[in-house]
Image (tube, grey):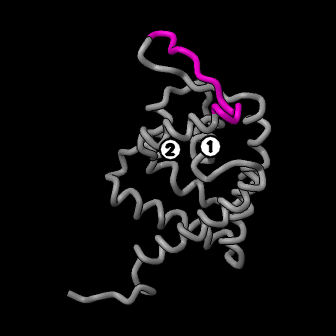
Amino acid sequence: MQTLHPDESFGHIVRNLNRLLQRELALRLARHGVSIGQWYVLRVLWLQDGLAQAEIAQRAGIAAPSVAVTLRSLAAERMIVREGHPTDQRKNVVYLTKKARQLEAPCLAAAAEVNAAALSGMAGPEIEQLLVTLGVAQRNLTGGDRADAAEGPQELRPPLTGRP
């Protein structure tokens, strides 16, 4: 068995890149009063409001107990409200407040800035190839059937069309 040097290991490089991306994004989000944990929940709700906790957890790729803690913090900061599910009394549906909606543009801009910084010095075709390659690696490990597998690489996309 051959041992790879960390600089030659795909997993090691991706892990370090993720750590750096998370750190930089957390710093930029903090300027808007949003934690990195809140970001993942808000990101899901900005795409589709009115989801149950389990659906948020699945779409964000976060364990349900962690989502519950994050939802409590978002509720305490008046960024979400919970209402009873229309057909299942055991569930609550989560809705964004105006305060959370107002954070969408600056937080998405912060994410786009981090992506742009990470991808600076690369040309458009290089970025597209990188995203394709990472998408293939992700599908290889997920079997391509998980919803979060399709969403992952989009977080890396720079605002090529002006939208993060």
- Element on which disc 1 rests: helix
Q: Is residue 108 above or below residue 132?
A: above
Whether the magenta-drawn stretch holds residue 76 is answered as: yes
**Mark 1, residue position:** 43
Whether the magenta-drawn stretch holds residue 85 is answered as: yes
Q: Position of residue 87 (x, y in %)?
A: 46, 10
Q: Is residue 130 above or below residue 54?
A: below
Residue at 74%, 48% in the rendered image:
33
73 or 157: which is nearer to us?
Answer: 73
4 or 93: which is nearer to us?
Answer: 93
Residue at 61%, 38% in the rendered image:
73
Question: Counting other residues with Cα less than 10 Å from the Cα at mark 2, is it few (<14), some (14-19), or many (20 or more)?
Answer: many
Q: Amino acid at mark 1?
A: Arg
- Element on which disc 2 rests: helix
Q: Is residue 154 above or below residue 128?
A: above
Residue at 46%, 60% in the rendered image:
135
19 or 142: which is nearer to us?
Answer: 19
Position of the N terminus by quadrant:
bottom left
Mark 1 to mark 2 CA distance (whole Å) = 8 Å
**Mark 2, residue position:** 60
Q: Amino acid at mark 2?
A: Ala
Q: Which mark is residue 113?
A: none
162 or 62: which is nearer to us?
Answer: 62
Q: Position of residue 85 (x, y in %)?
A: 50, 15
Which region shows up in magenta? 75-87
Q: Say whether marks 1 and 2 touch (CB < 8 Å).
A: yes
Residue 20 visible within the image: yes
Residue at 71%, 54% in the rendered image:
29
Q: Position of residue 23 (x, y in %)?
A: 62, 66
Residue 159 visible within the image: no
